[in-house]
Image (tube, rainbow, N blue to C red):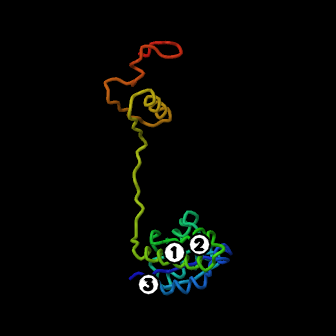
Amino acid sequence: MKRVGVFICHCGSNISAVVDVNSVAEAAKKIPNVAYVTHYKYMCSDPGQEEIVKAVNEHNLNRVVVASCSPRLHEPTFQKTLQRAGLNPYLLEIANIREQCSWVHSKFKDLATAKAIALIRMMVAKAAENVPLLRPSVYIRKKALVIGGGIAGMQAALDIADAGYPVVLVERDNTIGGKMAMLDKTFPTLDCSA
């Protein structure tokens, strides 16, 4: 059974000055799969994160939606919070109600509030379909493959080798040198290119 917790951030007054956070919280309580809703002045702060951890454990939440600022800014913060609460970090969704609601609709508070509710509704629906993911670990061999034995390929291979890495140079022709090997003289010295 999906039990989604919705955590709405005021972002100081960045969000709450435009979006009616109380109305958004009341509307979020009516969304299917939502088991818990709260709002806090700064959800990304340590006390805000602790509130998420506490609510996950007390209300047996298995999905989390944070309605706050850009996921680009705080997604890693909230993913670590979910891990501390014992949840997979990929069971998180962030509704960006700061940039997408309060900042762009600052003169239309009703519109900003309605849009915030719609964004949260979408993120709850998405969170309900999320599955736990694992971050794979991949062995990386520090070795380079350079394709093309022309002047650029040879120089790249030499630079990589000078940096201390093994290099494999692949050329489809019988000889290296590319177009340069076809020239009989090179500028500016007019030396033989072969």
Q: Residue at x 55, y 76 (%)?
A: 115
Q: Are marks 2 and 1 in contact (CB under 8 Å)?
A: yes
Q: Earlier in the sequence, mark 3 or mark 2?
A: 3
Q: CA distance from mark 2 to mark 1?
A: 9 Å
Q: Residue at x 41, y 40 (%)?
A: 143
Specify the quadrant that holds the N terminus.
Answer: bottom left
* Residue under pointer 3: 32
Q: Earlier in the sequence, mark 1 or mark 3?
A: 3
Label placed on residue 101: 2
Label placed on residue 128: none
Q: CA distance from mark 3 to mark 2?
A: 22 Å
Q: CA distance from mark 1 to mark 3?
A: 14 Å
Secondary structure under tag 3 reads loop
Residue 163, horizontal then vertical, whole percent: 50, 35
Residue 125, horizontal then vertical, whole percent: 43, 77
Q: Amino acid at mark 1?
A: Leu
Secondary structure under tag 1 reads helix
Badge nearest the viewer, 1 or 3: 1
Identify whether 137 is placed above or below 164.
below
* Residue under pointer 1: 119
Q: Residue at x 42, y 14 (%)?
A: 184
Q: Amino acid at mark 3?
A: Pro
